[in-house]
Each structure stands twice: as C-alpha cells, then as structure tokens.
Amino acid sequence: MVSLSEAREAPAQQLWDEINSVHAGMLGLEGLHAHMQPMAPHADPKTNTIWFFAKTNTDLVNQLKSGSRAHFCVVGKNHDYHACLSGTLEQRKEYSKIDEYWNSVVAAWYEHGKEDPELTMLAMHVDDADIWASTDSTLKFGWEIAKANISEHKTPDVGVRQHLAFA
C-alpha cells in the first residue's frame, strides 16, 4: 500500500523505493514513434540514474543517439502508484554496474554471462518525473466518487500528484 503522506512529504524517496520494488516498467525513446518496451530497472538514487541491462543488437540500443531522451513509466505492484520519468538515455558498458546489479534473472538472458558480447548497459539520467499515488481504500474511493457525482463542481480526491525535478 502506497503512503499518501509520503507522496506529499518525501515524493523523491518514495519514487526510488517504488522503482526498486517493481520487476519492470516501460522504457521508450522520445520522438521515434516506436513502442515502449518492458525493462527491469536498477535505481541509483544518489546519481538520479536508472540502469538497465540490454543487448547491443536490439532496436532500442540501435536507435540511441547522443543526447537521446527517454521516458520510463512505472506502475506500483499494488496498482496504487504510477510514475512517468524522463531524462537522457545512453549506452554505457559499465562493468561496476554489471557486477552490482547482476543476478540469476539477468544471467538467464546472456548465454556467456557477464562476458557476453551482446551485453551492454543503458543509463537513464532522470531529470524530471510526475508521480500519482492513490488511495487503496475502496470506501474512501467510493465516497469521493459519490460526492463528485452529487456536486456540480467537485472532483474526486483520491490521491496525490507531484511533479519532481532532479538536478
């Protein structure tokens, strides 16, 4: 269950915690008219970076150019948290990050392990995000919907929306 008070008081910390708690989100490059694709995130909040394992022969990697911008969208595991992040995306075969984030799930995708010639890393340097945290209370949700339907100028208050900017 997502904390609405945390969404109000510590939204950046909550964002990084949510990213680290999901198995995958949707990553895509801006301006290419290509579909986003599921990718497993590895968040580094100290540097506002999300790391992804990728293969060098994929469309996403092949479409990357210097200064490419990307979006990464996350839905929390309880479906009460949503976030859309944007920033620059670059290919970086960072061996320290490969070692840090390597696990049995990642290993299943690379026949030659950490030395696989197709293995690379993508680093998304997050500069901007919007988050939405919503109540998981069906009673509160129902009450807010009922109030909105009987009041001419009332919209439901079922959560928190925050905009975050990162340096």
Image (cartoon, helix red, strand yellow):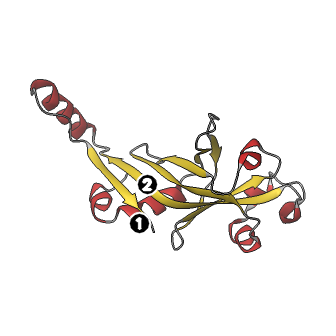
Q: Residue at x 38, y 45 (%)?
A: 80
Q: Secondary structure at mark 1?
A: helix
- The foreground one among 126 and 131 is 126
- The foreground one among 151 and 164 is 164
Q: Quadrant of residue 90?
A: bottom right
Residue 132 point in image, percent of width and height: 36, 47
Which residue position is annotated with label 2?
129
Which residue position is annotated with label 1?
13
Query: N-terminal of the two: label 1 or label 2?
Result: 1
Q: Quadrant of residue 36?
A: top right
* Residue 72 higher or lower than 32, as above or below: below
Q: Secondary structure at mark 2?
A: strand
Q: Residues within 10 Å of mark 2 (few under 14, many from 20)?
A: many
* Residue 100 higher or lower than 16, as above or below: below
Mark 2 is on which residue type? Ala
Q: Residue at x 18, y 34 (%)?
A: 155
Mark 1 is on which residue type? Gln
Q: Residue at x 45, y 69 (%)?
A: 167
* Residue 120 higher or lower than 61, as above or below: below
Residue 39 point in image, percent of width and height: 64, 48
Q: Nearer the viewer, mark 1 or mark 2?
A: 2
Q: Is residue 153 found left or right of 76 in the rendered image?
A: left
Residue 55 point in image, percent of width and height: 79, 51
Give how far apart the Cα atoms at labels 1 and 2 are.
Answer: 12 Å
Q: Is residue 63 found left or right of 57 in the rendered image?
A: left
* Residue 70 higher or lower than 150, as above or below: below
Q: Is residue 31 found left or right of 143 in the rendered image?
A: right
